[in-house]
Amino acid sequence: MPVFLSTSEADFEAKFTGLLGAKREDSVDVDDVVAGIIADVRGRGDAAVLELTKRFDRLDLTAEAMRFTAEEIEAECAKVSAEDRAALELAAERIRNYHARQKPEDAMWEEPTGARLGWRWTPVSAAGLYVPGGLASYPSSVLMNAIPAQVAGVERLVICCPTPDGVVNPLVLLAAKISGVTEVYRIGGAQAVAALAYGTATIAPVDKITGPGNAFVAAAKRRVFGRVGIDMIAGPSEILVIADRDNNPDWIALDLLSQAEHDESAQSILITDDAGFANDVAQAVEKRLETLERRAIAGPSWRDNGAVIVVRDLAEAATLSNRVAPEHLELCVADPEGLSQKITHAGAIFLGQYTPEAIGDYVGGPNHVLPTARSARFSSGLSVLDFMKRTTMAQMTPAALRAIGPSAVRLATSESLQAHGLSVQARLDQLND
């Protein structure tokens, strides 16, 4: 059974703190293995990638066969039904329209001194998009990673998607095509991350790597950070639902299970100001688990990591939510907009009982690649900005240098950086002649 808590209980704080500190990630230490894989790929390139793909994905490839040909992509895309294609195209359109609004503008202005200051935004040149394969093969993740990069103006987009036993998901390749990605490799794991970061004879290196993966992929992204940029180290999925009594308990139960079915380590939390409603939702979850296709995953997730918390009022609910800093936050209350103003830490907020989190996974528009494990306290979901860099701009006129240069000389002298000061003073000396 999930944890049942109430803020009116004397030991609530201790139990809630325990809930926040509970470790849900796998405890298996994969870092040493990943370090060996990365070193192997750096040293032997394609040969290492091919051997590791054969070992882990049971797929025997040549270097030339790592990349899907245009003909293969077209053949796989042709297998997708018209209905699935239409759904993907709708999702892509909405995701593109939303992210187009995120693109930042360059700026340049002149100060009273005559100095011109500003900034310029430019995209990274190449981005590697990791897409999980096998049972966790999600075409929606292709759209969520590739479209923001495309909107940013990234010239080269590369997808690595493992195909264990050679099984291909046509929807993944169609999502790549819709997103404008033509360079797709059927490799995965830490070896794919290493290939993207350091390059091989077949795969040119990229500047940034994004996308979810298993513990090996996450460890590899952590290790190559610095050589390349990464989006985040994603942990198990999570949802927190704040709901009042004026909701359908079955709807809320399904929302909680929508994340529980991802992974046994996923977490679903309900916070409500009505104890009776809390029990109704808990019963609805148990009833749905009897027939849910992924109950073997969702059941342990709900049992081991789930929580139901009864609070005195919704203000208290918001306070607890901010401490959780959930990846997904649903506000199923009479005034969701008002309650959202009290939320300071959340990856994504879904307003009202007609906005289930699952809409955000597919066709809502905002990105579904979001911070987990309380990292919403200091980070944001994937966006166009993740694929861009800001370069600052400055231009001094003679008058501007006369106005502010002496202060630069003073500060350089105070830091004992003589050449710094002289580089400014030399110009001032000439201007003052």
Image (cartoon, rainbow, N blue to C red):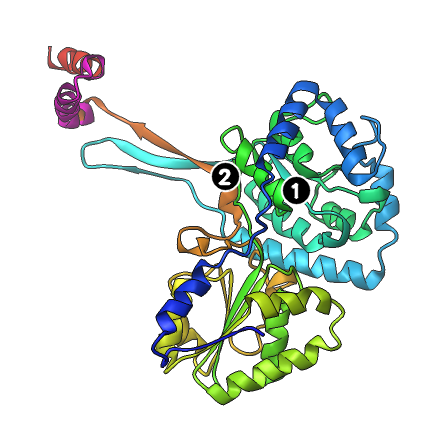
Amino acid type at circle 2 is Met
**Relative to 320, 88 lies left or right:** right
Structural crowding at the residue carrying mark 2, measured as other residues with C-alpha within 10 Å and reported as few (<14), some (14–19) or many (≥20): some
Main SS class of the magenta portion in the image: helix
Of the residues shown, which amino acid type is indicated by label 1? Tyr
Query: Mark 2 falls on what kind of element?
Result: strand
- How far is the residue under mark 2 from the one under mark 1? 18 Å
Left or right: where does residue 63 sit relative to residue 390?
right
Residue where numbered disc 1 is placed: 130
| Disc on res. 388 | 2
Quarter in which the N terminus is drawn = bottom right
Label 1 secondary element = strand
- Asked if 174 appears above or below 84 in the picture, the reply is above
Question: Between disc 2 and disc 1, whose residue precedes?
Answer: 1
Magenta stretch bounds: 400-421
Count every numbered label the image shows and give the total: 2
68 versus 179 height, above or below: above
Q: Nearer the viewer, residue 256 or 72?
A: 256
Identity of the residue drawn at 76% across and 54% down: 135
Q: Is residue 305 visible?
A: yes
Q: Position of residue 289 (x, y in %)?
A: 69, 75
Q: Which residue shows up at 30% across the image and 34% down it? A: 117
